[in-house]
Structures are given as structure tokens and as C-alpha cells.
Image (cartoon, helix red, strand yellow):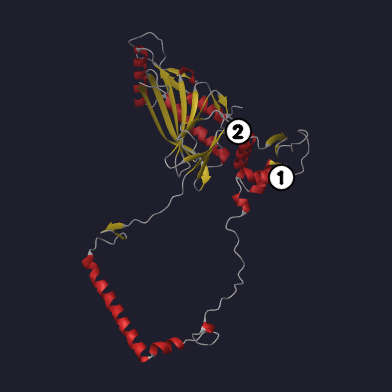
Amino acid sequence: MRRLLAVGLITVLLVALIPASGTAQSNAPTTPQKITTSQEFDDVEFHIFVYKNSADALWTFRYEKTLNSKQEREQFKEFANQFNSSDTEMYKSFRENAVNLTRTANNRTKRKMAASNFSKNAYINQEGIDGDTTRGVVEMSFTWSSFAYGSGNVTNIGDVFKGGLYLGKDQTLVINHADGMTFEKVRPTKGVNMSGDTLAESSSVSWTGPREFTDQHPMVKFSSPPQSSTTTTTTTNNSSVPPGGGNQGSNSRSPMMLFVAVVLVLIGLVAVFMWRQGSLGSLSSGRSTPGGGGGGAGGGTVARESNTPPAEPAVSDEELLTDEARVKKLLRENGGRMKQVNIVDETGWSKSKVSMLLSEMEEEGDISKLRVGRENIISLDGHEPDAAGSPLDR
């Protein structure tokens, strides 16, 4: 079903103004043609750039049209000058619809979302997306705050795509990440294009239409290495000096070295004097232990048995399970099937997280979902209800 976000990305935000091609030349200024679909463009790309250590993402809509003649290039130049220098209807519509899009997603996810930092640019590029002939390019961008979610070094996107997402013909969705991040998981895997040999080595992933994604898909999970703090030291004359230690030479260390040497000599002289007087021996033999006795074998340290119970493991077995494994474990413990709402209660996860996880598991064939009334019944293979109307007591 093409719900708001599906239609919003492909139709609502594609309201654009572009010169009509093939019209007769005239001395009067060319009036850009208003269009409401992407069919006037040869290629359309939607870029989502996910920032590191932030829930924000930069959305860029890039439209390209092949300019086959000098007349078309002149028309596009005139359009680009007008677009870049004034607040055109095309750009106004883009801003308004982006604000409405984030407001709707805000209501659904309960995260504080907003559209900001709008930018635009129209220009002629000698090489387009496909590296072919001269092309007219229109780019419009905005920052979507709180688009992503996660904790620690894990970032996820996809829960805003309620009802799924639809890509039309010659349309591509590209997802990029900032430096220091890696792709950990991508769904769906079918039809995905990676920029590298492996998912972890890729800087971007993409899907090309026409295709329709399922609820809360595409879904992408990123990871980034934990930040570590290091202490900087300054090296002088092959020695490490802490910050603020300065550049001290051997002369500045000589008084301290001399003082330490004198103290050691004095301690040695006192020890020799006490040994000759017999004081050192009496001090050693005069020490007593809690059990009595002197310095013999019986006066040694006695090991005591500790009554402290062994410490509990820092991480429980439950916490070591992946989210998918935990859901399967819950299902097995409840006879192979459960209501989705009960999985939410048992795990303590949010409804959106459970919904996205179950959609992913269903796509991978790990579980099946059956709609019964207003409830979703989640089942392991071989434990599906006999009929859609079967009662479920779990």
C-alpha cells in the first residue's frame, strides 16, 4: 500500500518546475513548465546521508534530465538562474511538503522531528548519473532531525517508513553514512546494490525502482567503534613528559638526583650502624603475630577462608542473545506462537522496534505473521493457527 511516506517521497516532493523541451524559440522569456510527477526527468535519486553520533540525516533529492540540443541547454540555463536566485514555487513546495512529511513521521514515531537547513542548486553537468551526455541537474536538500534512532554505537533507520515505500521507474534510493560508521545490517537484501565488495566495506547501499518495500522498510543498521580517550605526552630527549611538563634538560633534574642519592647513602649508613649494635636483629625478632610467636615458621601469615559468595556474571545469558534469538526463545517457551502485543510486554521493547524486527524476521522466513481481527499472531514454522479465526490463549 502506498501510504503517505510512499507517496510523499515520490509524488508530493516531486512537484517541480522545469523548462518544456521542444518548444519554439521566442524573444519572450521562457516560462518553466510545472510538473507533478518525475516523468519529465530521466533519472531521479533520493540520497539519505546519516550523520555519526547524531540521529539527524541529510536528505537530498537529485533530478537529472538529458539536454539533447543547444536550445534545451539554453532553456535550462535560464531556468537554473531563476531557480538559484529567487524563491521559486518549486522550492516553496519542496519546503512545505518536507515540513509536513517530518511532522507526520513525528506523530507516528513520537520522536521530536523537524525539517531544517534547506538548500538548493540547479546546474548543467557534463556527466550525469549514468556518465553520458550533458545533463541538467536540480538538487534540493534538507536536514531531518531525529530521523534515526539507537543507543551506544548502534544507529538504525527505517521505522518512519510506515506502510512501506515505493520507488518508481528510473528512481533510486541511496543511503550513505558518515566516516567512522559501517553498515551492519540491511533489509531487504534482495536487489540491494553495494558500493564495496562486502556490506562492511561499502560506503553506500541503494535500491532501484520500480519496487515496493514492506512496512518499515528499507531498514538499515549502522555501527561505529566506541570512542577511546588517550593521554598525550610530549617526548623530549627520548623520554615521555606529561603535558605541561615542559622541556627540561639534564641540569634541571640534577638536584633531585643528588638529593635521592644522599638519602640512600644515609639510610645505608644507619642500617650498618644498627646491625653492628644488634638493634636490627632485636627489631626483627621482637615482632609478634596475632597467634603469638616470633619470626619462626609458625609466625607466618595464615591464609583465611573467605565466606564471600562467588560474584554473579556481569552479563546474563539473556543479554547475550540477539533480538531475533530472544523472540524465537519466547515463542518456543509459549508453545510456538504469541500475540505481537505480548512480545512487546515480555521484552519491554517499543512497539515500533518489535514491529520492524518481526517484519524483518518474516522476510527472512524465521517466523510468520497472521492478522486475526486487530491482533497480529506471531508463529514459528509448524505452529501457525489452523484458521484465521482460531482463538489464541497466549
Q: Is residue 350 visible?
A: no
Q: Nearer the viewer, residue 292 or 39?
A: 292
Q: Nearer the viewer, residue 207 or 262?
A: 262
> In which quadrant of the rendered image does the N terminus lie?
top right
Task: Report the amino acid beneath label 1.
Answer: Arg
Horizontal side of 173 relative to 21 (left or right) equals right
> In which quadrant of the rendered image does the C terminus lie?
top right
Horizontal side of 259 relative to 155 (left or right) equals left
Residue drawn at (51%, 32%), measured in percent from left and top?
100
In the picture shown, does residue 314 fall above or below 15? below
Task: Report the amino acid beneath label 2.
Answer: Asp
In the picture shown, does residue 42 fall above or below 192? above
Please give the residue where the numbered disc 1 appears in the rendered image: 332
Picture coordinates of residue 79, whole percent (x, y): 37, 20
In the picture shown, does residue 92 fall above or below 377? above
Horizontal side of 52 relative to 352 (left or right) equals left
In the picture shown, does residue 318 fall above or below 79? below
Picture coordinates of residue 257, whole percent (x, y): 26, 72
Q: Is residue 6 visible?
A: yes
Q: Which mark is residue 215?
A: 2
